[in-house]
Amino acid sequence: MQLIVVSQMIIYVVLALVAFAIELWALVDCARNKGTDFQRAFKRTKGFWLGITAAAAACGFLSIPHPIGLAALPVFIQLIAVTASCVYLADVRPALKSVRGTTGNAGPYGPW
């Protein structure tokens, strides 16, 4: 029985860390983009998405179980936070990339 409890806790910690990594990725990516790119992509403002991703990252940090036994956030708040970050990464980020165009190793006929 003890093995099951320990394995569940390990899985929960790993999932919380993965969710926190996704939320940090969304926050850093949002902060690196220009505010005008959001307008050109017809998305909400940079401040809106920066607030959403920062709140999600804060919730992700608070959802990591602490070794001293502090209570983590409820699971539904964790799901809302990681979903908001995933919406940014799946919808807004590609739109911003298409507005900026390709950079880096692009040749005359596409990337090489």
Image (cartoon, rainbow, N blue to C red):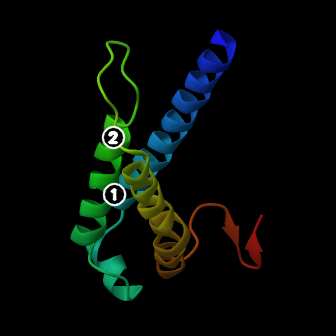
Query: Going 40% across and 26% down the picture, which residue do you hit?
Result: 65
Q: Quadrant of the N terminus?
A: top right
Calculate the distance from the C-alpha at mark 1 to the C-alpha at mark 2.
17 Å
Task: Tell me the element at label 1.
Answer: helix
The residue closer to the viewer here, 9 or 55, is: 9
Residue 104, numbered label: none
Q: Where's residue 39, x and y in %?
A: 32, 85
Q: Is residue 45 above or below residue 2?
A: below
Q: Where's residue 76, x and y in %?
A: 42, 53
Query: Going 37% across and 87% down the picture, which residue do you hit?
Result: 40
Q: Residue 103 falls in which quadrant of the image? A: bottom right
Query: Going 41% across and 59% down the picture, which residue do you hit?
Result: 80
Tag 1 residue: 53
Left or right, 3 with reference to 52: right
Q: Amino acid at mark 2?
A: Leu
Q: Residue 32 falls in which quadrant of the image? A: bottom left
Q: Is residue 68 above or below residue 43?
A: above
Tag 2 residue: 73
- Pick out the residue farthest to the front: 1
Q: Residues within 10 Å of mark 2 (few under 14, many from 20)?
A: some
Left or right, 106 with reference to 22: right
Q: Amino acid at mark 1?
A: Thr
Q: Where's residue 58, x and y in %?
A: 29, 44
Q: Is residue 33 above or below residue 75?
A: below
Q: Nearer the viewer, mark 1 or mark 2?
A: 2
The residue closer to the viewer here, 97 or 71, is: 71
In contact (CB < 8 Å): disc 1 and disc 2: no
The residue closer to the viewer here, 90 or 28, is: 90
Q: Residues within 10 Å of mark 1 (few under 14, many from 20)?
A: many
Q: Residue 62 falls in which quadrant of the image? A: top left
Task: Tell me the element at label 2.
Answer: loop
Q: Quadrant of the C terminus?
A: bottom right
